[in-house]
Image (cartoon, helix red, strand yellow):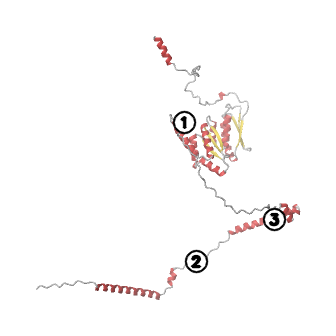
Amino acid sequence: MSDTEETKVEQTEQKPVNKNKKYRRDKPWDSEDIDHWKIEPFLPEDNKYPFLEESSFATLFPKYRENYLKQVWPLVIQALDKQGINCVLDLIEGSMTVKTTRKTYDPYAIFKARDLIKLLARSVPFPQAVKIMEDGVACDIIKIGNILRNKERFVKRRQRLIGPDGNTLKAIELLTNCYVMVQGNTVSVMGPYKGLKETRRIVIDCMNNIHPIYHIKELMIKRELAKDEKLKNESWDRFLPKFKKRNIKTKAPQKKSKKDKKAKSLFPPAQQPSKIDLQLESGEYFLKPSERAAKELQRKKEKQAENNAKRQEERQKAFIAPSEEPQKSKKRKSDEDSSITVEDLKKKFLEKAKKRKTEEASQKNKSSKTEDYIIKPKKSKKKSTK
């Protein structure tokens, strides 16, 4: 009985095997410690034999980059020589070329070299551009010149991507782990593939009138959510902001005032005389070609003389002195006071003295009148005691 019980326990302990994994065997060499996504460096030992054919890529560069490329080219040769790639700078044609040689061992190195010369042509400095040769670093050159037709609007939106003192561009670089360079009609981006995808979306949306700040906010929220282990594998739609497009009403276009319509005639307007008709009227048509040319030259000279005379008149206007207005003489009070004589002053003082006397006399009369109506108390006589 004990044996049967043990067999039952063993059967219950065995886990149900999936049908798909029924015939799979254990792989002792494949453990969980191994990172299957790790990119191993490609060494010369991995490809001992040279390529059968030569591959080459060429790109043009603008004239203003010529001096910089001359200075940096020895460093470019040094960097590409490690990968066994030959590079040529043609200043006459204005092009850069990269080619594989018999020393080239990495087949993908030629594509990296092609990206390097593209970035150098788009004003990316060499110390930054040479990082493209590293594994895990890619580049993307986004063309923005053909998105907008209006040049002023294009310049304004391109400046919006850079931001005040380049702050918006720095924020994009920090959030996407990419290097971004805005130059002319293109935006050069360097970094990991995920960052390139996000940067391209930001740049194209900015040129389509969606401000980069919305994408920056979204990326900041995503970065914080990625840190939380609970929310790592969940949908983040409820946390991300949803910006509604607002249609702001612009100013209504001013209606053009309808001008008085001219009365249309039933008959079409008279045909204008052609150039030959005018020449026939003036008699110029019958002149010789040399005479006609001389007449035309004389007409031009007369016109030039008139224009020169007008220019001289305009220039002479600067040397004509402006007309000065006569200053209005202002009479001072001191001049008016000087006309008063001594006799006038005497009369003035005498009049003031008379006024004072009359005022004093009137005040006395008033006081005397009031005293008549007031009853004064009688003085009591004290009896003398003998």
Mark found first going from the N terminus, 2 or 1: 1
Q: Which mark's residue is nearer the viewer, 2 or 1?
A: 1
Which residue is more in the foreground, 181 or 69? 181
Q: How would you rate the neighbour count of disc 1 (Cα within 10 Å): few for under 14, some for 14-19, many for 20 or more? A: few
Which residue is more in the foreground, 104 or 25? 25
**Residue 223, image x, y percentages:** 54, 39
- Image side of residue 272 versus residue 14, left or right: right
Q: Secondary structure at mark 2?
A: loop
The residue indicated by pointer 3 is: 299
* Mark pair 1, 3: CA separation: 83 Å
Q: Which mark's residue is nearer the viewer, 1 or 3?
A: 1
Q: Is residue 80 visible?
A: no
Inspect the image, locate mark 2, and give the three-letter code of the amino acid beneath it: Lys
Q: Seen from this angle, which residue lies furthest left?
A: 386
The residue indicated by pointer 1 is: 235
The residue indicated by pointer 2 is: 328
Which residue is more in the foreground, 156 or 295? 156
Q: How would you rate the neighbour count of disc 3 (Cα within 10 Å): few for under 14, some for 14-19, many for 20 or more? A: few
**Residue 302 circle label:** none
Q: Seen from this angle, which residue lies furthest top?
A: 1
